[in-house]
């Protein structure tokens, strides 16, 4: 099902990465005069269920940032963390364990947005509220959905690639298109936004793939096959839905002897390796999503829900096929070599020292990263 999300316009975008571009610094989140901070007493249990670990964000960003905010708001609360390693069945087992363990709230980033409806039903039957984290849980009744404007993520990728192809003298491409997992509603939205932007610009897609489980290795294998089929110069760019799949495509091209500095590749997540590839000219762009804001908003709402309160931070609604879920959607930002300094570095996502190791030092200097 190609879910149509009905969405009211959201105001929280100014508190996300988009604020960088606008020079806005005052954001909610860190100002803890919210009801949450004042009555967060009591040892509550919060389950955090994330979908996979091949994408670095979950273990390196989402989990620690969520835990730190919970600790700050509610020192007695505990976070019980599970990672499903891309396996929806494993996630169901983890969720059942959390329910049996009588957690007070569940924060769930589903491997499979449809299958996870069963988890919500079970949690609700046990009076456990559920936050749909980053990916929308379909056809069920989660209490809150916290994510980014994901169709916009796809549009930013598609528009940036189309412009780069035109700048390179290849306005029609053709390109190879590597989408995300078909069980992730976000991937559906990235695909929709990017396909629209590429089609509007007249870019031709000569081969397309929905990557099972978002696996970088499967994206790499697909790319190898396309190089065999179309030849080393048979495509002018690669749309990859995230940095993991983009990294797989770049690895395949390098192995086959394709000059990756001449083939723009997109991505998403601003993974450290991707930022370094961008500086080295091996990847064209990524999409930076302020995961700190996302994880901290989820922590605030989780502490509220664990204490029997309705979270106060929802700013809109998204329909999930069953209900209009109260939602927070943050703004994504496109990142190329030109604005690494003004986005991920300025925002403290990475320090210059983390990025500018060894062979990246010269590229950092020329990109103004200090
Ligand atoms: C997330 C991306 C991530 C991908 C793979 C998506 O749902 O929004 O940030 O790269 O899943 O885990």
Image (cartoon, rainbow, N blue to C red):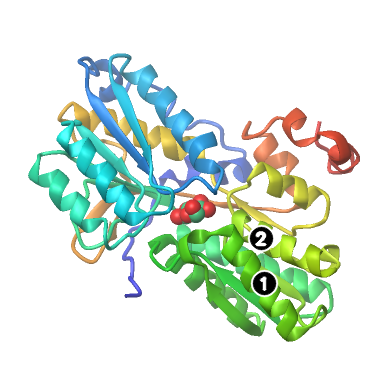
- Quarter of the view holding residue 168: bottom right
Q: Position of residue 43 (x, y in %)?
A: 22, 17
Please state, as top left, top right, bottom left or bottom right, where the C terminus lies in the image: top right
- Asked whether the viewer can see residue 199, the reply is yes
In the image: residue 46, left or right of residue 282: left
Answer left or right for 23 relative to 364. Answer: left
Left or right of 212, for residue 285 = right
Does residue 316 appear in this view? no
- Dot 1 or dot 2: first in sequence order is 1
Q: What number is the disc on residue 39?
A: none
Q: Give the residue at x 60% y 60%.
A: 217
Q: Position of residue 337 (x, y in %)?
A: 78, 50
Q: CA gap, disc 1 to disc 2?
A: 8 Å
| Crowd around label 1: few <14 · some 14–19 · many ≥20 (10 Å) | many
Q: Which mark is residue 248?
A: 2
**Alpha-carbon neighbours of circle 2 within 10 Å: few (<14), some, or many (≥20)?**
many
Q: Residue at x 71, y 40 (%)?
A: 342
Instruction: Give me the disc on residue 223.
Output: 1
The image position of residue 186, as x and y in percent, is 43, 60
| Residue drawn where x is 56% and y is 32% of the image | 25
What is the quadrant of the N terminus in the image? bottom left
- Helix, strand or loop at disc 2? helix
How many badges with numbers are in the image?
2
Mark 1 in CB contact with mark 2 (< 8 angstroms): yes
Q: Residue at x 47, y 37 (%)?
A: 62
């Amino acid at each position: 099902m190609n879910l149509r999300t009905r969405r009211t316009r959201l105001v929280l975008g100014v508190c996300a990465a988009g604020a960088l571009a606008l020079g806005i610094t005052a954001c909610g989140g860190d100002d803890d005069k919210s009801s949450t901070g004042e009555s967060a007493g009591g040892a509550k249990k919060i389950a955090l269920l994330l979908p996979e670990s091949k994408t670095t964000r979950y273990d390196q960003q989402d989990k620690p940032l969520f835990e730190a905010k919970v600790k700050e708001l509610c020192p007695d609360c505990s976070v019980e963390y599970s990672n499903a390693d891309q396996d929806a069945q494993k996630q169901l087992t983890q969720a059942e364990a959390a329910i049996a363990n009588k957690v007070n709230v569940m924060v769930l980033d589903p491997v499979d947005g449809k299958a996870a409806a069963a988890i919500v039903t079970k949690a609700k039957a046990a009076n456990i509220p559920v936050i749909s984290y980053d990916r929308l849980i379909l056809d069920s009744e989660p209490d809150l959905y916290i994510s980014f404007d994901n169709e916009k993520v796809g549009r930013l990728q598609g528009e940036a690639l189309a412009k780069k192809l035109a700048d390179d003298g290849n306005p029609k491409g053709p390109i190879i298109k590597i989408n995300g997992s078909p069980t992730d509603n976000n991937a559906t939205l990235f695909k929709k936004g990017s396909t629209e932007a590429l089609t509007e610009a007249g870019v031709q897609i000569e081969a397309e793939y929905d990557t099972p489980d978002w696996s970088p290795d499967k994206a790499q294998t697909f790319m190898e096959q396309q190089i065999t089929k179309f030849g080393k110069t048979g495509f002018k760019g690669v749309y990859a839905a995230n940095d993991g799949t983009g990294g797989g495509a770049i690895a395949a091209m390098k192995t086959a002897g394709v000059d990756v500095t001449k083939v723009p590749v997109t991505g998403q997540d601003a993974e450290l390796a991707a930022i370094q590839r961008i500086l080295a000219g091996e990847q064209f762009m990524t999409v930076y999503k302020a995961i700190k804001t996302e994880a901290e908003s989820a922590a605030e709402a989780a502490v509220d829900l664990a204490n029997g309160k309705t979270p106060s931070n929802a700013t809109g609604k998204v329909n999930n096929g069953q209900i209009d879920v109260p939602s927070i959607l943050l703004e994504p930002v496109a990142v190329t070599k030109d604005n690494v300094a003004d986005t991920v570095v300025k925002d403290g996502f990475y320090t210059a020292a983390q990025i500018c190791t060894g062979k990246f030092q010269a590229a950092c200097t020329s990109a103004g990263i200090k």
